[in-house]
Amino acid sequence: MTRLHAVLLLLGFGALGCGEVEVTCDDPVACTCGPTRALPEGGCCPAWSVADGGVCRVRTWTYPAASQVIGGPGARRVYASIDGRGRGLFVWDEATVPGADVVVVAEETDAGLSLRKPSAVLPGFAGMGVVIGGEAGDAVVSWRQSITGAEGDVYRSERAPDGTWTDPMSVADRVSSGEKAYEPRLAARPSGEILQVWNQWYDGSHYGVALARRKGPGEAWEGPSAEDDVLSPPSFFSNAPQVTVNGRGDALVSWYQSAGSQLMAFMSERNGAEGAFSRPGVDDYLSAPGAPVDNDPICNPKPALAEDGRSVVVWTQETGQGGVAVYLASRDANGAWTQPADLADTFSQPEGKCRDARAAFDPLGHLYVTWSEDTGTGAAVHLAERAPDGTWIHPGDRPLVLSTEGATQAITPVLAVGRDGGVIVAWSEEVGDHFRVAARRGSAAGFGLIEVLSPAGDHALSPQVAIGGPKDRAAVVWIQGEPTVGRVLFATLAP
């Protein structure tokens, strides 16, 4: 066995150790890495460090000061993405004037941070803004624009690889069809394909999950053929669709919907880039019958895909015994699904109140699941981890606790995984009189210490995390301050 010793300047990075660390070079977790972590004599530096000659140097956060807020007051629902060139994109809804809400886009450029409002030219008010950065440096922003009251349509703005934006100029430039639509979501694959889903009203009685596809930058979008061309079955209303896609083109869409009585978790899958999305029937739900899926807009069913086609959908659901637990449905590489047998077949402990469940795979096939759980002493952020062979390192009923011991509550965890196997989980936790945004970095080899990203003095809420670019640049963005005066702040982790 060949071994290499490297000095790690870990600066309190915690669980990965400090001082002189032995790296086993035939360990696929330790030694499968990109060029930034490759050591000259063989072997790899741990995740979230870079090789600097024969030394492994830990990557450090650039923390914002309270004075570095961006945008106007009244920011909410912030989202983040990093394009294939490593440039950050942040989108949020901003309510500076009642009834005149706009969607604000902040993009990193060579000249610094640039702000724009692609919804401002349209009548009415905007919300539900989301963003995705493409591999070629392109980007798509989408939102709901409401002209009259609660009704609205879905719009999108696109950035070409050369940085040029194309915005909607009138109500005729809407993406959706039918009387109304809302809740857009986006996903991108390395080939340049971008998928978009949203909820669309059709037949005068249903909301359904609509899907559009763009094969690459500059190509035309392929959308629904009619307002009733939806993935979901014709049963009441679909809710909160989510979409993900892997490098080979497998895709997964999940949502929740009433199957006739209770709200249940559904999914549609595509096998390969040229495959067709499945269209489940009203009885083809993933969740166990007998109690509804939790209808919180954050903890609706979330999909995750591995590069070999394995996938999961994770959600929270009432247990029928007074609790709200995390449930998991899983697909193997051959396409066979395993779903909860009944309400007792929970992923987490069944007694607590769970919310905000999310999942992600790393490039080697490790699965991470995060959620917030309150067992009566305040909510804490949990993490479960499964190895590529299916073995649970941290099972759902015995998870790793990520948040600060003694925090009054820790909520809204978010999760991102980089191409090099690094993982970031961020959340908001109440310590003392204020909420703060904290994060932990890790990989399949373990997780480091808690890092507080937000400045003291104001509440820091609703974090989002993104990892992207050729060297896994990372950003965590959140709302700083009370909801009515909140502004956007972000911390970055350079290569």
Image (cartoon, helix red, strand yellow):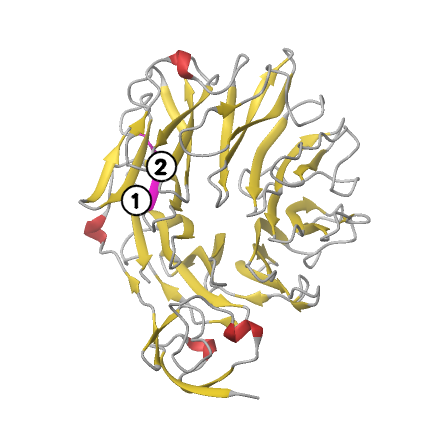
Distance from Cα at disc 2 to Cα at disc 1: 8 Å
Q: Is residue 429 magenta?
A: no
For mark 1, what is the residue?
488
Residue type at mark 2 is Trp
Q: What residue span does the magenta drawing correspond to?
A: 88-95
In the rendering, at what x and y percent does residue 405 appear? Answer: 48, 68
Q: Residue at x 49, y 54 (%)?
A: 415
Q: Are marks 2 and 1 in contact (CB under 8 Å)?
A: yes
Count residues near mark 2 (Cα–Cα under 10 Å), then give few for <14, some for 14-19, many for 20+: many
For mark 2, what is the residue?
92
In the rendering, at what x and y percent does residue 19 appear? Answer: 38, 87
Helix, strand or loop at disc 2? strand
Residue with the most extreme right position: 341
Q: Residue at x 68, y 63 (%)?
A: 397
Q: Residue at x 60, y 53 (%)?
A: 307
**Residue 35, picture quadrant:** bottom left
- Quarter of the figure with the N terminus: bottom right
Count residues near mark 1 (Cα–Cα under 10 Å), then give few for <14, some for 14-19, many for 20+: many
Residue type at mark 1 is Val
Helix, strand or loop at disc 1? strand
